[in-house]
Image (cartoon, rainbow, N blue to C red):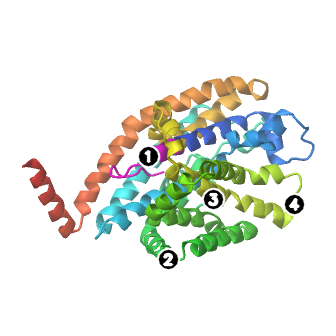
Amino acid sequence: MSRLPSPGRLVALDSLRGVAALIVLVHHVSMTAPAVSAAYESSAGVEFLSVGWWTTLSPLKLLFAGPEFVLVFFVLSGFVLVRSPLAAPAYDWMAYYPRRVIRLVVPVVISVGLAAAWIYFFPRTGDPGGGAWLARQDNPSLGLGNLLREASIITETSRPDVNPPLWSLAWEMWFSLLLPVGVVLAAATRRWTGLWAALFLAVSAYGYLTGIEPLMYLPAFALGALLAANFESLQAGAASLAARRWGTAAWIGLTVLGPLLLIAHWLARPLLTGPWSDLTLALRVPGAVLVVAAVALWPPLHRPLTARPLVWLGTVSFTLYLVHFPIVVTFGNLFGPELWWLGALVSVPLSLVLAELMTRWVEQPSLKLAAAAGRAFAHPFHAARLQADNGRADN
């Protein structure tokens, strides 16, 4: 969930990140409704045109596709993180690592503390009457060891207990630490780009078939890196496609195809089982890539995505992702299964407000701290060059 550096910043991608975070929030809110939770667990017995059908088996699933849009985060991170090292003639890795770790860890640590506070003051009931999803949100250990484990985010990639969305931050951190490998791979994709893309997609599909999580998720970062490494050539190809007589229709088709692939598993769920169902899960990876590519490469999508509300949503996307879950569970429990919609009316705006406050008071100061750490650990050559550039700017 990194942001693009100012030069070449694509605001539409920031907004896409905000939309993805909002969909994750909507997904979790919807799971406090017992009918939706039951349909999510199993499609057996879900009546046609029922609430469960609309939210899990119809095209409207796109509005509730939280796990699928986490993969959009992964593709965006691969795209964003790789751009700067590829563009820099001599990238300063000594400054990168402390800058990146602080940028991720500080907001995560605060979010774990906030989640623990919500759980302490509003103990979770684990009542099965609220549906299978809320029943799984029982009281986790608030011991120091468990809190430190979750705050470290890299110790394990299984589902955390205190703030479950942090599972994806573990993969973000792993890719961040392995970024030099990602940069080398990205540079290699400038030749035989199509074959590299097919290889990454095949690895991901194998991961979904075997349940090997690194193979499921890391290819999404790699495909984002591929987009970054070939961005200029892809832009030229996109412009050439748009200029053709049928170009607009082709771009509309690609723009629609991405979201359809994201939710293909759900649309086909009643029809498929076993490995075939697992393969439809793997389709969310090319779907996430197409969503990011369409936003990055097709200019007509830029204008709607640079509307001020969406731009604001992009600025709070990281903190919204970090803070919303305990709020949703708290009010889902307080209002109960019959009044879940009242919990939604409280938890959605409260999550947005808290995300804004955390952006101002935690994320932005952490970015300044990360920048200072980067300067402190900068390689002497880069530090001298930065000081010289600042001196010329002052003159």
* Mark 3 and mark 4: Cα distance apart in space: 25 Å
Q: Earlier in the sequence, mark 2 or mark 1?
A: 1
Q: Earlier in the sequence, mark 3 or mark 1?
A: 1
Along the horizontal axis of the image, is 149 left or right of 213? left
Disc 3: which residue: 158
**Residue 346 spot, x, y in % from top left:** 61, 24
**Residue 358 spot, x, y in % from top left:** 43, 36
* Label 3 secondary element: loop
* Mark 3 and mark 2: Cα distance apart in space: 36 Å
**Which residue lies at the image location 67% right of the left edge and 35% below the top edge?**
29
Task: Mark 4 vs mark 2: give the one in front.
Answer: 2
Along the horizontal axis of the image, is 375 left or right of 181? left
- The amino acid sitting under disc 3 is Ser
Disc 4: which residue: 273
Disc 2: which residue: 191
Question: Relative to the observer, which residue lies in front, 236 or 204?
Answer: 236
Disc 1: which residue: 107
Q: Residue furthest front?
A: 245
Q: Earlier in the sequence, mark 3 or mark 2?
A: 3
Question: Relative to the observer, which residue lies in front, 44 or 191?
Answer: 191
- The amino acid sitting under disc 1 is Pro
Where 240 sits versus 10, above or below?
below
- The amino acid sitting under disc 2 is Arg
* Mark 2 and mark 1: Cα distance apart in space: 38 Å
Q: Which residues are magenta?
A: 1-16
